[in-house]
Structure formats: structure tokens, C-alpha cells
Amino acid sequence: MRKILFLDIDGVLNTERQHDYCVERGIAPVDGFSYSFDPEAVANLTRIVEQTGADIVLSSSWKYWGLSAMQNMWANRGLPGKIIDITPDTVSDDMLLSVDLDMMLPAVKGSEIKEWLATSGSQVTRYAILDDQFDMLPEQQPNFVQTDPRVGITGEDASSVIAILTDKATVAGPIEQNINR
């Protein structure tokens, strides 16, 4: 049984609140990426990972730094969980032929998640998506938790994700149905 958390960074871990805090105090970015992540958001991510055992797939624009750079940053910052992959940068030709383009254009990130699940998610039994932007496909809505970019992952958001990734919630149909729609 494999659980995956599709994780955005800006507005989820990299919050407006933490940015303002660092700027007001003259704190420089901690590394080549950005300011430190919001400690409350990180604590809530830790809770999710510890209670579900989910692996992380980055669906954030930060993925353009590359998987290795993101894994190194994760380790250097002592962040919870394990980044196992990043979503694809673009939608494949096969995906373009099989998806409703009117739905795909406003849901590029959702389409990238769908493609990742179709190509790499054969062992995935449950997944959740944490993002501050609402650009998911309709069939992903039961698996989606939207954060407030000001504060990132809240305790309530963490509880919702934990419910999605555990037996405490029913995901809309088997994973195969969500992938192949």
C-alpha cells in the first residue's frame, strides 16, 4: 500500500506570513531557494507524514530546480518525509488526446498529477493534493485540500489530508477510476 502526497510549496510551506516575518527582521534567505519555511506549516506537514507514512511528490513550480536539488534542500532543511519524485513538466501527447481540453487548460497542475499517477502510480492506493491554487481536475476534488497562502498548512488542513490518506475518509472510487477518467 503506497500513499502519495502531491505537495505544492509556495502558499503551502513558503507562506506570506513567514516571508513577512523574515523581511521585517532582516533575515536573509536560508539557502539558494528562499526564506525558511513557515514553522507552523512544517509542523503540520510533519503530522501528516508521521500519521500516514505518505511519500511526497512535488507538484510545485519549485520542481524546475530538479528532483535532486529538491531532495538536497529537503534534507538540508531537515524537512519531514521523503520526496520521491516530481510531477512532469508538461502534459504528454497521449494525455492531450485523452483529456477534455476545456477542462485541462485551467487545470494544468491537475493534469500533471493525473499523468504522474498514470505513468508512475501503479502502486498508489491513496493520494492527497495540498495546494493553494485551485487548478485540479474535477475527479481530483475529493483528494484536494486548498491552503490559505498567508498561513499555509493549518491543523485543519492536516486533519483533512490525514483523513483522505487513511481509512477515515472514502476517496471517490478506486484509484484506477480517478486516474483513467
Image (cartoon, grey):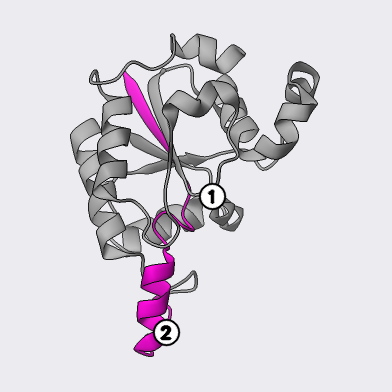
Residue placed at 58% from the left, 20% from the top?
118
Residue type at numbered disc 1: Ser
- Please say whether residue 18 is visible from this viewpoint: yes
Residue 163 % position (x, y) = 27, 28
Residue placed at 57% from the left, 38% from the top?
87
Mark 2 or mark 1, whichever is nearer to me: 2
Q: Earlier along the polypeptide chain: callout 2 or callout 1?
A: 2
Quadrant in which the N terminus is drawn: top left
Q: Secondary structure at mark 1?
A: loop
Q: Which picture quadrant has residue 173?
A: top left
Mark 1: few/some/many CA within 10 Å (<14, 14-19, 20+):
some
Residue at numbered disc 1: 60
Quadrant in which the C terminus is drawn: top right
Q: Is residue 12 magenta?
A: yes
Say left or right for 96 vs 2. right
Rounded to the nearest angstrom, the CA distance separating label 2 from label 1 is 23 Å
Q: Is residue 150 above or below residue 128?
A: below
Residue at numbered disc 2: 23
Q: Is residue 137 above or below residue 67?
A: above
Q: Which picture quadrant has residue 17?
A: bottom left
Residue placed at 19% from the left, 35% from the top?
51
Residue type at numbered disc 2: Val
Q: Is residue 101 above or below residue 46?
A: above
Residue placed at 66% from the left, 36% from the top?
107
- Contact (CB < 8 A) between labels 2 and 1? no
| Residues rendered magenta in the picture | 1-30
Residue 43 % position (x, y) = 23, 54
Residue 77 % position (x, y) = 32, 64
Q: Is residue 45 magenta?
A: no
Q: Disc count in the image?
A: 2
